[in-house]
Amino acid sequence: MRVYEIIPGMAAWVTLLGLTFLSWKLPQVVVIFILLYDLYWLLKLFYLFLHLRFALSRMRKNLRIDWLEKLKAEKLDWEKIRHLVILPMYKEPYGVVDQSLESLVEANYPKEKIFVLLACEERGGEADRETAEKIEKKFGSVFGGFATTFHPAGLPGELPGKGSNETWAIKHALPVLVDERHIPYENVLVSVFDSDTRTESDYFGILAYHFLKAPNPLRSSYQPIPLFTNNLGDAKFFARLVGFSSSFWHLMQSSRPEQLVTFSSHSLPLKALVDVGFWETNLVSEDARIFFQCLARYKGDWRTVPLFYPVYMDAVVGKNFFEAMKNLYKQQRRWAWGAENFVYLARDSKKESGIPKRIRRFWLWTEFDGFFSWSTSSFIIFLFGILPNILGNENFKSSILSYNLPRMTGVILNLSTIGIIVSAVLSLILMAPRIKGFKKRYYFYYFVEWALMPLVFIFFGAIPALDAQTRLMIGGRARLGYWRTPKR
């Protein structure tokens, strides 16, 4: 039923157009709504800040632990675990993939227990084949297993993208990497990384630890915290700010595991991956969809375990400022296309599963609320506060309420800047160790950039989200295909 694809975009447009119309006809009502909405977000901001502090503290604590020694000290049966790392690659520079593999080499974990699957695209041409050959020549003998696959172009029913590539790759590599070694699927953890993902040395140790300590390890995904800090010195300031805000959001979400959905680089048991038939091959947001596939397959008995441990990824870049901004917009629009998972929960998963109604309602609301807020809240907070004074009638414009509106909203927004200032300070804590040649004067430059966050929220948050939801609502040729974020 197409109606489920229409709901997210329709809700956003009805809200925005409705508030615009009411600012003209009933400005007093809009003023009260705006004030209450701003107050709600101020309270929510401080609530999220508490989660951010908790997650950051937990992550920094985990970074100080030798997780391999902890596995040995607690006498956990970690030696049976094998880690299969999938690295999808399409037109990636050799240096990007090389640095990601180097981070695996530096892992504080026995390399013979790590298998690497380099998942290339046939449409990447000769350049990708040469890159893959160089990578396999350098790293092929370092790990317990190494395989390279080339996903054919134009397979029926497939959308070119990460999900279809990963599914092709693992189906063709499992016999070589796992089956020939007679390794039980229950003992294999699959880590799906982007080509630019770099791990900290104890990633596989903490992953194995959480897997072995989880109440139901085969019914769980495992989510590290993606920090977009690999290339901050090269990223333009808008891209840097989006990278920071995205990193903070994932930090906060890690401390709310009941709402945590897999994103980008994550891990899950191979047994579950086989049970659900691997990733769907005809959609864009495969990283979150695999969570909901498992939720449907196991009738609601699925959760995401936060690792409170980082993986490092690239902020968006381009050849120049305008190309970087274009790439940033497209990346955010692709992420916002995750609204298609609301459709899956409302329509598709119901056909094939018995998810309890309580769990289905929870996730339907969580997904709807998240994408609705993404596409509307920045407009309401930063722009709609002035609409009643612009569109309202003369009686309203001469009222005390009209006179005090900008002052009241200003007070709330000024209080909100406390959260932005704290975020700026935290960003510097995260950033400095990751930038080669970082100088003290950079603290001032990066701190000042945070004054531009309202523009970032609107132009690289709300607008691309509204764009994606509108395309989903219209359907047909307006639908998005998979767009790969260029790496440099």
Image (tube, rainbow, N blue to C red):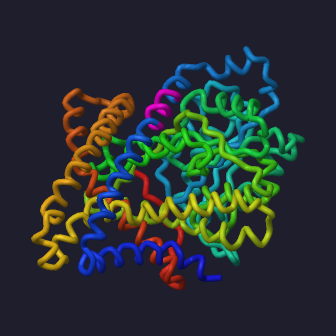
Task: Pick whichever, 424 or 346, lies toward us.
Answer: 346
Q: Which residues are magenta?
A: 51-58
Residue 402's image quarter? Answer: bottom left
Residue 407's image quarter? Answer: bottom left
Question: Residue 346 in magenta?
Answer: no
Q: As displayed, is residue 227 above or below residue 360?
A: above
**Count of labels in the image:** 0
Q: Is residue 407 visible?
A: yes
Residue 331 horizontal/vertical position (percent): 43, 61
Residue 231 horizontal/vertical position (percent): 38, 42
> Going 49% across and 48% down the picture, which residue do you hit?
94
Task: Pick whichever, 244 or 253, lies toward us.
Answer: 253
Residue 238 horizontal/vertical position (percent): 29, 52
> Going 52% across and 44% down the picture, which residue do you hit?
253
- Residue with the most extreme right position: 182
Residue 418's image quarter? Answer: top left
Looking at the image, residue 362 sits to the left or right of residue 61; the answer is: right
Q: As displayed, is residue 156 above or below residue 99?
A: below
Residue 420 horizontal/vertical position (percent): 30, 42
Q: Is residue 125 visible?
A: no
Q: As displayed, is residue 19 above or below residue 290?
A: below
> Going 26% across and 65% down the picture, which residue do you hit?
31
> Going 22% across and 46% down the picture, which residue do you hit?
414
Q: Main secondary structure of the magenta part?
A: helix
Looking at the image, residue 405 sits to the left or right of residue 219; the answer is: left
Q: Which quadrant of the figure contains the N terminus?
A: bottom right
